[in-house]
Image: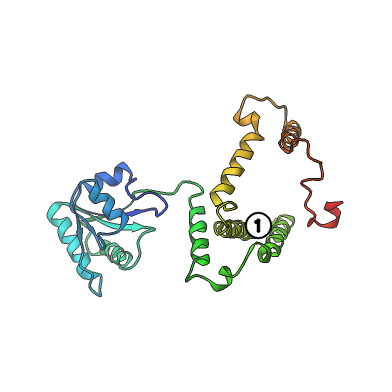
Amino acid sequence: MTRLVLLATSPRVAAGLLSATAWQALQSGPVYAVDLTTPLAAAVAAGGLEVRALAQPGSPQPAVRELVSAADAAGAATFLIGADRGQPPASEIAAAILELTATRPDLDIEQIDGSWDLPGARLLDVVATMDRLRSPGGCPWDAGQDHRSLAPYLLEEAYEAFQAIEDDDSAALRDELGDVLLQVAFHARMAEELPPDRRWSIDDVASGLVDKLVRRHPHVFADSDVDGAEAVSANWETIKAAERGGASALASVPLAAPALTLA
């Protein structure tokens, strides 16, 4: 049986970090791509394999015929769809290949994920999207904001997330937390434009958070022992007080908090 492999990858993983299954498929026959300049095609070529360019006519059918002919001749061939299952015309060629299952039962068409996302990988997309919106040629409204103009939205989104919790609406909470995350990403992106001595980024936010979580959970990340959730809470407050270095207990109270909370 002739084998034709459609190889897809994650755009959030380095192009050359492919699974063993993917490399085995690549080595089983000729490799084709629409664009030889893509990171995936370049990585495969750097791995010592020839990547051949497919013709790019108005219709995907000539490319499909070329791939099937190459697979028939060698017994196997691989088509590099690329990141996120490809963009036109690669995605159109892949779709046309999958339609062959009805007319070519002897053709074993296999879709392989050469790489996949780790949990949290889509956060990279949030950062990239926010950068695109804020950069020249992006969104004029986004480009015109600053920390003060966005401040009311941060409060509003937090209240809406709180309301979703009160309503026990899991779907709404997911959506509202996305809006809260947008505010975090937005403020961090703007901070990248500050003068060098005041500049910080989303990585600094994440790094500071991780350091704080590790520091305040010595019972998880160190050798401290605790007995139950109440002890964890007490230990947290003790560590927090030590971090403040004897500052007033009111030092971290936000004056913008609702009146009852502030009191």
- Residue at x 66%, y 64% (from the top left corner): 150
Residue 98 x %, y %: 29, 62
Q: Quadrant of residue 100?
A: bottom left
In the image, taking residue 137 as reference, residue 87 lies left or right, namely left
Q: Is residue 125 above or below residue 237?
A: below
Q: Is residue 242 above or below residue 80?
A: above
Q: Residue at point 73% right, 37% down?
A: 240
Instruction: Note whether residue 110 is visible.
Output: no
According to the picture, the residue beneath numbered tag 1 turns out to be 173
| Amino acid type, mark 1 | Leu
Q: Is residue 253 left or right of residue 60?
A: right
The spot of residue 57 in percent (x, y) is 22, 73
Q: Quadrant of residue 192?
A: bottom right
Count of all numbered marks drawn on residues in the image: 1
Q: Position of residue 129 (x, y in %)?
A: 50, 62
Which of the 4 image quarters holds residue 219?
Answer: top right
